[in-house]
Image (tube, rainbow, N blue to C red):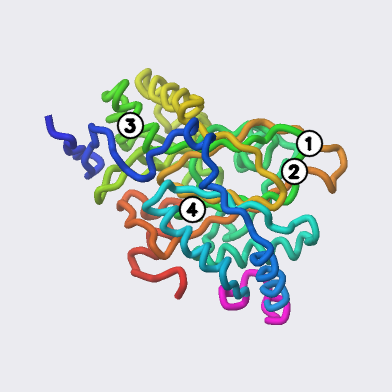
Amino acid sequence: MSAVTKAPAAGFEVLRTTLDDPSVWHGRDMMARRDWVLTVTPEDVAEIDAALRHARASGRTLFDQRREDFPLGGLGEKLVGLRDVLEGGRGFALLRGLPVDRLDETTARTLFWGIGNHLGMPESQDRAGNRMHDVRDTGKAFAASDTLRDYQTDAAITFHNDGADIFMLFCLQAGRQGGESLLVSAVAVFNEIVRRRPDLAALLQAPCWHMDTRGQRRDGARTQVMPIYTWWNGQLTTNYKNSLMHAAQRFPDVPPFSPAQLETLDLLGEICADADFCLRFEMQPGDIQIANNYATFHGRTKYEDFPEPEKRRHMLRMWLSLPNGRKLPHNFEGTREFGATYARRMRNASPEA
């Protein structure tokens, strides 16, 4: 039997074999290693302090600042080097030790924006065009609003990917307890499903998965319909949002999950959470988690906050297109999360332009 077969409805091939790829890794192995942690050095901190002074002197507002407004020497080279780790490598890294303990929030935002500009081009994360989000509890439950998103609650967040090529999550405050970060290789998970249930691996690649857009599409569409995995151009590219697929079931025009779909989602969630596959770690103030949205899924355990507002868990998030980002399959065109990155690729425009 061929490793791939045509899926005429989607216009793509269906991958039926496992992949041997640098993005395939297992959480239990990563827990025993620390090469994925890039610790900031005193020399890096000195460069950051100088870059912050330069950014202030530029006179530009935060989102008008460019890479040259935040000059970094050795640290900038390290960040550029991360691009090949994020795309074509294991797909993630943790930058640790940024000096947030002595920065006010405005300065921390400038630091985060500057680092992001050294990696790629910040992209919009919502209908309003915001390119930096505050990840903190609003006190509301996900089900209480048709537009509230998981990151605006203190609840556990099931495995998913974000938008653009990569996401960056900058920890300013860690909260009282909980909120452990979860990360898994999406390709390793796919390989395991191929081994256990090749029929469900094929279903993952079918264009039958409705996702609630939470009111974030500019055209007003309430859902998007895509495969969870797309095999194209020799790469397996993902779009998986467990909670949003379940949320879409509330719409009368969305078909109810079939028994096979429910079985697929259960198996996918089970493998993602398996200790052999899932990397678990605590983010500390001054950490930036960076991961490829096509090659990894991430999540979070429920957390408990401090009662004092100034101590409550607070993170900043950015989505970035990479200069070396992969070509995207055409079913990513027009999606709320990946449309801007797809268009950038089609224009052959560099995020550094």
Q: Which residues are magenta?
A: 55-69
> What is the spatial separation of the Cα atoms under label 3 and label 1, in whole angstroms?
37 Å
Between marks 4 and 3, how big is the CA–CA gap? 22 Å
Q: Position of residue 215 (x, y in %)?
A: 55, 46
Q: Residue at x 38, y 24 (%)?
A: 264
Query: Type of residue at label 1?
Result: Arg
Proximity of marks 1 and 2: CB atoms separated by less than 8 Å: yes
What's the residue at 48%, 65% (across, down)?
Answer: 80
Give the CA separation, mark 2 to mark 4. Answer: 22 Å
Apparent side of residue 2 relative to residue 137 in the rendered image (left or right): left
Q: Earlier in the sequence, mark 3 or mark 1?
A: 1
User: Residue 313 got which mark?
Assistant: 2
* Residue 186: % across, % down: 41, 38
Mark 4 element type: strand
Coordinates of residue 61 in the picture (x, y in percent): 68, 74
Left or right, 217 with respect to 9, comes to right
Picture disc at residue 339 = none
* Residue count near mark 2 (Cα–Cα under 10 Å), binned few <14, some 14–19, many ≥20: many
Residue flagged by tag 3: what amino acid is it?
Asn
Mark 2 falls on what kind of element? loop
Q: Give the residue at mark 4.
A: 166
Tag 3 residue: 191
Image quadrant of residue 230? Answer: top left
